[in-house]
């Protein structure tokens, strides 16, 4: 093995067939960094091409983060990429600093590479990311389905107190905003119908339009979007904060399953709550339409209700109720999965919460379109 010392003894290089060991020496602290950098520029290390580079910390007495960054520059001068360097013989505290610096170097390198991508590469990178997220979502959906089946076969696995708490937050606390939004939607739809039907003397048909539109499409869709922005984002923020505070790691240490403790109560609570909220949305939307029909078209409330009983079949009402648990399942799964995917920084919570709302709303609209096609094909 050949040894090479530089003039200031800030590092030593030991060469052997197939690998080269770079050994920083002394105190790589802020006061010494200028001299070390000058030495690297004056006498850069020479390493045979193709050698594995090992960064050896046995000679270090002190190490700051800026010193670790300079160590990686020394290794890079020798021809190594920061992610390919092997670490050996570091003290624990020095190793932690070195690994933290390497992590940020890799992130910065990836960002630089991303900024240099041409349009085709950007599209390809985005497509790969979409596929990766879809695979992860399907995997999480399968795991959730399995755990839900287990819980339903053995109900004592369900955390009933948490389920009740989540139902209160997702259902009872959401009633005012759901009722208000659907009431206003009913008012708008009835007003639009009224302005057109008055021209042809078909005032009574406003009941058909409001009842069918609200019960079949608008109430389930509006309620699901409100719940996605309200409960879905809350799930991500709550679980993400728990992960950031290492509470989920503590659960695993205690032998508890995050799926049973965190995901299942929220999933079941939302699947129970959303049909109830859709029913409330139906009632609020129809009531809003009833008020406009009474004020604009002189249709009494008694006449409106009698006509509603004739034109709104049970299947029209059930279409919206059937959609609700499916919407709820996707909102809860997306919210919980994004919470569990939070990284160890506050910025990630914000990004994942925003992503939860966007993904949930898009999923609800796509599912609504799928339901529309299926029900038309079935003649419902």
Image: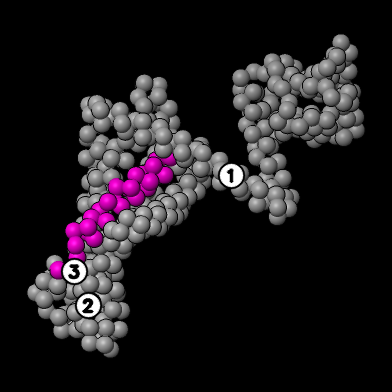
Going by the image, does 18 lie left or right of 211?
Answer: right
Q: Residue at x 74, y 50 (%)?
A: 116
Numbered badge on residue 311: 3
Classify residue 249 by image quadrant: top left
- Tell me what residue is drawn at x 45 percent, y 42 percent: 338
Rendered-image quadrant of the N terminus: top right
> How far across and down, in percent of the image, does residue 169 sit?
26, 47
Residue identifier under label 2? 205
Query: Badges 2 and 3: C-beta atoms under 8 Å apart?
Result: no
Give the residue drawn at x 30%, y 52%. Answer: 323
Q: Position of residue 220 (x, y in %)?
A: 30, 58
Q: Are marks 1 and 3 in contact (CB under 8 Å)?
A: no
Q: Quadrant of residue 200?
A: bottom left
Q: Secondary structure at mark 2?
A: helix
User: Mark 1 = which residue?
Assistant: 129
Instruction: Name the one closer to the observer, 93 or 257.
Output: 257
Question: What colour scheme was applied to this rendering of the protein?
Answer: one colour
- Mark 1 and mark 3: span between their CA atoms? 47 Å
* Range drawn in magenta: 310-337
Element at badge 1?
Answer: helix
> How far separated are the C-alphas under marks 1 and 2?
49 Å
Identify the residue at image location x=14%, y=68%.
310
Seen in the picture, residue 220 relative to 94 is either above or below; the reply is below
């Amino acid at each position: 093995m050949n040894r090479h010392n530089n003039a200031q003894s800030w590092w030593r290089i030991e060469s052997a067939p197939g690998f080269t060991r770079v050994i920083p020496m002394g105190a790589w602290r802020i006061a010494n960094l200028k001299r070390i950098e000058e030495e690297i520029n004056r006498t850069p290390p020479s390493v045979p091409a193709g050698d594995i580079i090992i960064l050896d910390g046995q000679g270090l007495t002190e190490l700051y983060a800026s010193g670790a960054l300079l160590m990686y520059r020394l290794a890079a001068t020798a021809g190594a990429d920061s992610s390919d360097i092997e670490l050996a013989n570091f003290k624990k505290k020095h190793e932690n600093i070195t690994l933290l610096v390497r992590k940020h170097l890799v992130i910065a390198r990836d960002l630089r590479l991303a900024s240099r991508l041409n349009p085709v590469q950007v599209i390809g990178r985005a497509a790969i990311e979409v596929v990766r997220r879809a695979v992860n979502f399907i995997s999480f959906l399968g795991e959730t389905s399995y755990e839900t089946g287990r819980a339903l076969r053995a109900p004592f696995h369900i955390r009933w107190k948490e389920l009740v708490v989540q139902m209160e937050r997702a259902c009872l606390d959401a009633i005012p905003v759901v009722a208000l939004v659907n009431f206003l939607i009913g008012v708008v739809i009835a007003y639009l119908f009224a302005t057109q039907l008055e021209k042809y003397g078909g005032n009574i048909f406003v009941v058909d339009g409001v009842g069918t539109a609200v019960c079949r499409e608008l109430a389930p869709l509006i309620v699901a979007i409100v719940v996605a922005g309200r409960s879905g984002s809350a799930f991500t923020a709550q679980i993400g904060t728990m992960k950031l505070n290492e509470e989920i790691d503590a659960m695993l240490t205690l032998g508890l399953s995050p799926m049973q403790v965190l995901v299942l109560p929220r999933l079941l609570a939302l699947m129970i709550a959303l049909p109830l909220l859709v029913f409330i949305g139906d009632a609020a939307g129809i009531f809003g339409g009833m008020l406009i029909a009474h004020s604009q078209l002189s249709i009494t409330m008694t006449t409106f209700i009698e006509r509603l009983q004739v034109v709104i079949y049970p299947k029209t009402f059930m279409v919206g109720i059937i959609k609700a648990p499916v919407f709820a399942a996707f909102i809860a799964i997306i919210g919980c999965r994004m919470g569990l995917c939070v990284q160890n920084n506050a910025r990630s919570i914000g990004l994942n919460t925003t992503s939860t709302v966007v993904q949930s709303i898009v999923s609800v609209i796509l599912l609504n379109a799928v339901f529309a096609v299926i029900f038309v094909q079935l003649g419902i």
